[in-house]
Image (cartoon, helix red, strand yellow):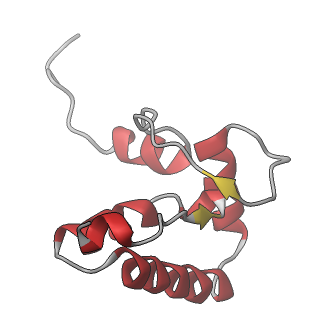
Amino acid sequence: MSPAAASPPVQLLFEPEFLPLLRVYGYLRLAGVAPQQAAGAVSRLQVTLAAHGGPDLRAWRRQILGDPAWSGRRPVAVTAAPAPSGPHFASHAQHRPAADATDG
């Protein structure tokens, strides 16, 4: 039996506002970090970020999940990201140059 098959599976639980940390875990695994060590590193990073959070993180959670009442932890399934929306993206759209500024 290979060492990889002998190691127990890793289950990561994320607060919804930290779903992007799943990508960090993937990068660590691609770099050759063992599953348990990668999971530990991501968990420590999540704790650090949570200690410095604020109202913006709650808004991010609502946008990602579409459920403002969700506040627990659960295993997550990875799906395609929704199209960017919200005031941050709307303000950037206003600053883009018009395709044809000579109309009218």
User: Of 93 and 8, which appears nearest the observer?
Assistant: 8
**Residue 6 location (% of width, % of height):** 37, 70
View extreme (right): residue: 69
Q: In what quadrant of the picture does the C terminus appear?
A: top left
Q: Is residue 75 above or below residue 51?
A: above
Name which residue lies at 58% across and 49% down.
76
Relative image position of residue 68 (x, y in whole percent)? 80, 45
Position of 43 with respect to 65 (left or right) is left
Quadrant of residue 60 in the image?
A: bottom right
Q: Residue at x 49, y 66 (%)?
A: 10
Q: Residue 90, position in %: x, y? A: 46, 40
The residue shown at (37%, 39%) is: 94
| 99 displayed left or right of 17 | left
Q: Please state the horizontal and vertical placement of residue 35, each as a whole percent of the image.
A: 37, 74
Task: Identify the image quadrant of the N terminus.
Answer: bottom left
The one nearer the camera, 33 or 17, is 33
In this rendering, the answer to whether 60 lies above or below 8 is above
Instruction: Decide: is 55 above or below 19.
Output: below
Q: Work out whether 15 lies above or below 38.
A: above
Hey, which quadrant is residue 102 in on the image? top left
